[in-house]
Structure formats: C-alpha cells, structure tokens
C-alpha cells in the first residue's frame, strides 16, 4: 500500500477541520475526492504534504510504510509526494527553470545522486514541456508571476512531470480551465500514469473525470469521507448535487 | 505563538562568516592613536611629496574642528580614536629576490579568499580581471598593470600613483569629495594609506574588468583606503570592489573614499560586494563601514553607475552618489543591502541633477533579518537649471522575521517645472505560502529563502559583471543561512 490514512484529525488555530479521515491508496490507482466547498479537501492535501500551520491531533498517515508525521515537508516531497496547488504561489524574480533545477538537484542529492548536468536538465525540460504542450517561453518567466489561471495549472502539471512523483495529489487542477486546457492537463496526467505510482485528484466537477478515469471516488463532507464508490458515484453526484449527501448526513 | 515560518526564518538567518581567519604575518605598525605625528608618520612611510603631506595636515586640522554626525538611523558606540592603529603594513621579507615578488603567505591569503594574483592562471580564462590586492594599509600586488599600460590605462595602487603620476593625483584627488565634506571624509583624507588608482585615457574602452580586493588582517587597526577613477572623454571602465576581514570581538573602523570623474561621453560602472565581518550573532565585533563614495558626470552624455551588494559590516554608513553636471548625463544606483542579527545599515544615494536633460535611476532592495535595522536614505535634487530631468526611484524592503526593522527616507527636491520624479516603495515578507510551495518541491527551507531573496534582488544582481554575479548570489544565500529545525 502506498498511502494509508487512519482516523486523521487535523485543526487550525484550534478549529477542527479534519474529523477522522480514512483513506487507502495503492500503487497504480487513481482516486477522486469530491465534496462541497470548505469541507476540508485542500486541508487534507496540505496535511499529507506536511504543511505546518495545521496541527494533526489524532490518527496517522503512512506512506510506503513510513510514518509521514516524522518527515519534514521537503523530505516528503523528496520521497515522492507531489501536491498540485489549488492556488499556486508567485515567486518574483525566480524563473521556473531555476526553480525546477533547484528542486530536481535537491531531490537528487537526497537520493545520493550528482546534480543533473545543465544540458541534460534542459533536455528533460523540453521533453516535459512537450508533454503538457507548453510551447512558449513560460519557463523563463518568474514562477507563477502574472500567469493566467490556465498557465498556472499547466505549470503545476509540468512540475509534476519534471519530478515524477510516486503519489501526486492534484487539488482542483481543473477549476477555471477551459476545455482545451482541461484536456491538456488530463492528458498530462494520463501519460504519467504508471503501475507504480498513484494519483489523488481533488475536484468539484465530474467533467475532469471524463478524461481521467478514477478507480475510486470519495466524498469528503465536513472533515470526513462519508461515501466511497466507483466512477459511477461521480455521475450520481453530478446528477443529484451535494444536498443529497447533506440530507443523508442529516 | 511563533508561527513555523518565523521559526524557520530565525534559524535560517544565523549563518556563519566564512572569511573570519587571520593570517600570521609580520606587520609593521604606526604608534597607536591619532595626532599630527601619526599623519606625518604615514606620509613619511609612503615617501610622499610635500603636497600630499600638506593635504593630509589640512584635512587633519579640519577634522579636529568637526564632530561625528548623528543624523543616520544608527546606534554607534563612541569611536575611541586614540585606541586605533592608523597604519599597518605587512613587512617585506628580506629573502624575496625582487621588489615585485609577493610574500607567499599573502598570496596564500588571497587564494584562500578566492582571489588569484597569478596572471598566468587568469590568462587561461575567458575574460581576465585585473586585481589590486590591498591588505591592511598597503597594496601588495596589482596584476595586469603592464597589459593595461599598452592601452594607456593606468591601474595601480594609490601610493604608486602618488609616486609616478603626482600631477594626475594633484588634479583629481579631493575634486569630487573634498576633505571638508564630512567627518569621515576628513579623517580619511588625513590618514588614508592605500587603495587603487585608475585612469582611462580618451577614447579607450578598458579591455578587462578592473578590481580591488580589500582585506583587513591586523587587529586594532583601521583601514582607510582611497580610490580614484578618472575616465577621460569617451572612455569606458567597469570596476569591482570586494572586501573581507577576520572575525574579532572588537569593532574595527573602515572609513574609505571613492571618487569617480567621468568626462564627456565617458562611462564608469562601479560594483561593490561588501562582505566585511558583520559581528557575531549577539552583535559583538564587526566592521564599522563608514564610506563616502561619489562620482561626478563632468562632461555631457557621461554616465556613472553604482551597483552594490552590502552583506557585511556591523554598521554601514554609505551613500554612493552622482553629481550630474554634464547635460544629458546619467546616474544610476542599484543596491541590495542585507542585514542580519544585530547589523545596522543606513545606506542610499544622492542624485544631484545640475545639467539639462539629466536622468537618474535608483533601485534599492533592503533585506532585514534577525534583530537588524536596514534603512534607505536618499536625496534626489533637481536644480533650477536642470530642466527636463528625470528620476525614477524604487525602494523595496523585505523583512525576514518580526524583530527586524526597515526604514525609508527618500528626500526629493525639484526646483524646476519641466522635470519629473517618480518614487515607488514597497515592504514585503517571505510568506509561509512561498516557503511551503518551495519545500513541497523538495527544496529545503534554507535554499528556498536563498532562492526567494535572490529573486527579490534580481533587478540589482543582473547589473553586476558576470565574474561578480555568481559570488554575490551565493553570498546573499550564505548571509542568511544556518541550520533549519
Ligand atoms: N489557513 C487557514 N486559516 C483558517 N482557516 C482555514 C485555513 N485554511 C482552511 N481553513 C478553513 O478550513 C476549512 C476547510 O477548508 P479547505 O480545506 O480549503 O476546504 P476545501 O478545499 O474543501 O474547499 C474551511 O472552513 C476554511 O475556512
Ligand atoms: Mg480547496
């Protein structure tokens, strides 16, 4: 098992957001997490990635058999956890190229590898840019600075492609995308699917799941996974809306 | 409760100074303290002509009538001038065969600092850099002087210039920064020991970067260097200055003067990476860096550009300035000043627009961490005759942590109606969001701060010559580095 979350409780400033999440993800699987706004989807992603503003008050997260709580944010990333951000942050003056070279080489160092030579790094960049259909000189621009919504999301998928994670959590990578951008993002994910990695796709809308076919769909509601099923659950949610869940939870 | 990002910042910003070693060399000192005798001693040691002694004495007598300025936003312990040694020179070893030969100990010192004084080594490289190496009060070696002299360029220590080109020294010394200018300028004019002299004749583009490396080695001594750069009509030169000092518990005084003269159509680019010992984490020791740097754009269409990366010194008091006398002349000031722990910096520029259609640009990036204080102080003055002049100023402050301070004092005075002055200022912090984003990509908090700070300072760093840019980038990260918990 790649990821195992047991009875996870997390809070921020004393306010409990996650109230007993259970989730298991195996290699080769794609999981979709859906749910209304403000139920804790991004919080769950942040807690898995190790964001320190959240306090884990109970439960555990195991990744590849390791207790994630013992790892720093950067070590989780180096062990293969990737988070595609719902709201990617701007880093003025730092080019995507420089940012990625730093990331790639710090991860390599962690694995006991030498830095990637400049030429090889640039070749890798070109290959991955093609994968997410980045044709412009986007990678010479400062990270996310002045990017359109679509460029920001493409940039997240591009970075994922560069870092080849074991577990990729994509937080609403589809929201705000037009249909072309959505197709590009979804294609990027599909090309990166392998038997030895896994994806957790957080989304609001069923439409992404037309492109990325999930093995499992979960509904997160008020800090708990209240329903799990196959890809048909997404269609059901699309049809009935979340009110149905709310009523069920009473 | 302290937020996690603050905790990271606190720890990241406690790096160690890497140049704090002392070289054990036999040194000759002036008697401790300051008097007319000290001034005469220095002049005599340097075998100076009478005009130099008179210049020094006038400056000394003027200094006696002045008192230390207190207008800067700095907290300075009183300086005990009678406890300072004003001249320290490495003794020449007897067994060296030629006068040009440098004590291997000194060569090793500069090698350790990453400065090669070996011309052969540099020839293999793409572009050479000529170096004047100054340790304590004297220049120990200037490289490539001969190559440069083929172009008519004079690049030598100030002392040599006094001996070999006294007329040029007489003509220009004190013409931009008179000894009456300020307290530390008067002091420097009385006791300055060495520095660099550089003269680019009419129409010559200097084929290599010129640089001076200043090293303080001896204890209880002050360093008072003086640099003079003259670019004749249509000449161009790019000049770089670097500095380091050993780690000591006492404060050491460094009071320098740099003068630049640019004639018609001439351009001088002056870059500094200042990395004097900043004192320890508790504010003990460090260099007092009190410097007067000024250039005059004397001829029409001339240009002077100052770029500085200030990471060292416990106290920095420094305002590289431009007098824009020639019509259409251009002044630029690009600055990154980093303060950490208990460091204090009060730095900025003065742009004095006197000629018509003169232009100036000021880009200042302050970065404060720890309990430090970082101030920008600038004056843009456009005189009545400087019609159609323009200034653009941008002063940004980046705060790392909650205990440091950033201050901006921009003074603007415009005395005609056709000129335009624009001023922008921002204050920002490294956000927890930015750190998390970087760390999530596998980048350590320490490297993340280095990346973000370098990105923030990019506009200034890109002004540096290639040879300096890489070093400066590393230095910015190192100045803020430490362990991460
Ligand atoms: N940094 C924060 N500070 C305070 N409250 C937060 C913070 N981040 C999220 N929350 C709160 O946690 C809850 C869940 O938010 P989030 O995980 O972003 O939901 P979702 O991604 O499902 O829309 C919301 O009530 C939100 O207001
Ligand atoms: Mg969200």
Image: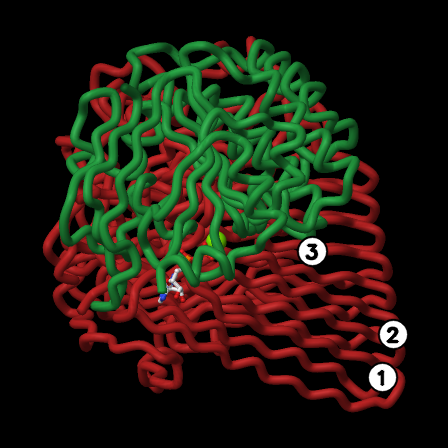
Chain colours: A green, B red
Q: Chain of mark 3?
A: B
- In the picture, measured across the screen, residue A204 lies left or right of residue A9, that is right
- In the picture, measured across the screen, residue B182 lies left or right of residue A52, that is right
Quadrant containing the C terminus of chain B is: top left
Using a 10 Å C-alpha cutoff, classify the residue at mark 1 as few (fewer than 14 neighbours), some (14 to 19) or many (20 or more): some
Q: Mark number for residue B356?
A: 2
Q: Is residue A104 visible?
A: no
Say which element carries label 3.
strand
Query: Which residue in the protein does label 1 denote?
Result: B385
Query: Which residue in the protein does label 3 denote?
Result: B304
Say which element carries label 1.
loop
Asked if marks 2 and 1 fall on the same chain, the answer is yes
The Cα atoms of the two marked residues, 3 and 2, are separated by 16 Å
Q: Chain of mark 2?
A: B
Q: Position of residue B18 (x, y in %)?
A: 24, 37
Q: Position of residue B474 (x, y in %)?
A: 41, 36
Q: Position of residue B389 (x, y in %)?
A: 83, 75
Q: How many marks?
A: 3
Circles 2 and 1: CB distance less than 8 Å? yes
**Going from the N terminus, do you reach mark 1 or mark 3 first?**
3
Quadrant location of residue A247? Answer: bottom left
For ligand 1, which image quadrant applies? bottom left
Residue at left offset 59%, top offset 43%: A143
Dot 2 beta carbon under 8 Å from ligand 1: no
| Above or below, comparing residue A238 to residue B429 in the picture | above
Query: Between residues B288 and A41, which one lies in front from this camera angle?
Result: A41
């Amino acid at each position: 098992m790649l990821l195992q979350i047991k009875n996870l409780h997390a809070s921020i400033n004393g306010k409990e957001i996650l109230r007993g999440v259970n989730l298991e993800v195996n290699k080769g699987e794609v999981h979709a997490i859906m749910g209304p706004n403000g139920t804790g989807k991004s919080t769950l992603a942040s807690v898995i990635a190790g964001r320190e503003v959240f306090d884990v008050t109970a439960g555990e997260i195991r990744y590849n058999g390791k207790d994630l709580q013992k790892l720093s944010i950067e070590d989780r990333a180096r062990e293969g956890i990737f988070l595609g951000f719902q709201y990617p942050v701007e880093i003025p003056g730092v080019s995507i190229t420089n940012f990625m070279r730093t990331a790639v080489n710090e991860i390599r160092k962690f694995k006991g590898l030498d830095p990637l030579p400049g030429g090889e790094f640039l070749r890798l960049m070109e290959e991955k840019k093609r994968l997410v259909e980045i044709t412009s000189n986007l990678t010479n621009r400062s990270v996310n600075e002045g990017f359109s919504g679509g460029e920001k999301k493409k940039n997240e998928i591009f970075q994922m492609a560069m870092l080849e994670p074991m577990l990729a959590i994509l937080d609403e990578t589809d929201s705000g995308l037009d249909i072309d951008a959505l197709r590009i993002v979804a294609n990027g994910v599909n090309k990166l699917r392998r038997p030895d990695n896994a994806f957790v796709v957080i989304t609001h809308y069923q439409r992404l799941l037309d492109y990325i076919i999930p093995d499992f769909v979960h509904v997160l509601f008020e800090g708990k996974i209240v329903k799990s099923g196959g890809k048909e659950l997404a269609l059901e949610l699309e049809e009935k809306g979340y009110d149905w869940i709310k009523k069920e939870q009473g | 409760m302290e937020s996690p990002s603050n905790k990271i910042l606190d720890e990241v910003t406690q790096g160690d100074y890497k140049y704090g070693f002392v070289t054990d060399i036999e040194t000759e000192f002036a008697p401790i303290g300051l008097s007319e005798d000290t001034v005469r001693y220095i002049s005599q040691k340097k075998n100076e002509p009478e005009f130099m002694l008179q210049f020094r004495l006038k400056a000394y007598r003027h200094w006696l009538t002045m008192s230390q300025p207190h207008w800067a936003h700095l907290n300075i312990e009183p300086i005990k001038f009678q406890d300072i040694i004003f001249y320290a020179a490495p003794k020449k070893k007897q067994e060296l065969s030629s006068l040009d030969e440098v004590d291997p100990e000194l060569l090793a010192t500069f090698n350790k600092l990453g400065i090669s004084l070996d011309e052969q080594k540099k020839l293999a490289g793409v572009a050479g850099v000529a170096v004047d190496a100054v340790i304590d009060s004297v220049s120990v070696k200037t490289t490539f002087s001969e190559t440069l002299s083929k172009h008519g360029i004079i690049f030598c220590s100030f002392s040599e210039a006094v001996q070999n080109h006294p007329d040029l020294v007489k003509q220009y010394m004190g013409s931009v920064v008179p000894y009456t200018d300020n307290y530390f300028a008067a002091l420097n004019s009385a006791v300055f020991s060495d520095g660099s002299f550089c003269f680019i004749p009419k129409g010559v583009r200097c084929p290599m970067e010129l640089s001076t490396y200043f090293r303080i080695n001896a204890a209880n001594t002050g360093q008072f260097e003086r640099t003079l750069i003259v670019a004749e009509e249509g000449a161009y030169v790019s000049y770089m200055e670097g500095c380091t000092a050993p780690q000591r518990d006492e404060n050491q005084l460094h009071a320098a003067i740099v003068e630049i003269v640019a004639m018609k159509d001439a351009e001088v680019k002056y870059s500094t990476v200042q990395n004097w010992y900043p004192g320890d984490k508790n504010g003990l020791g460090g260099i007092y860096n009190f410097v007067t740097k000024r250039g005059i754009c004397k001829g029409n269409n001339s240009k002077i550009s100052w770029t500085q990366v200030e990471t060292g010194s416990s106290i920095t008091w420094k305002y590289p300035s431009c007098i824009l006398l020639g019509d259409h002349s251009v002044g630029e000031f690009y600055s990154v000043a980093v303060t950490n722990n208990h460091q204090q910096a009060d730095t900025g520029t003065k742009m004095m627009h006197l000629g018509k259609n003169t232009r100036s640009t000021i880009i200042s990036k302050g970065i404060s961490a720890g309990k430090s204080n970082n101030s920008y102080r600038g004056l843009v003055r456009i005189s009545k005759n400087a019609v159609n002049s323009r200034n653009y100023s941008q002063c940004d402050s980046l705060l790392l942590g909650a205990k440091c301070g950033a201050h901006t004092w921009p003074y603007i005075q415009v005395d005609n109606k056709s000129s335009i002055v624009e001023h922008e200022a921002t204050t920002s912090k490294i956000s927890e969001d930015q750190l998390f984003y970087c760390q999530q990509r596998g980048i350590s908090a320490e490297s993340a701060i280095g990346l973000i700070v370098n990105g923030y300072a990019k506009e200034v760093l890109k002004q540096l010559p290639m040879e300096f840019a890489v070093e400066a980038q590393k230095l910015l990260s190192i100045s803020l580095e430490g362990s991460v918990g």
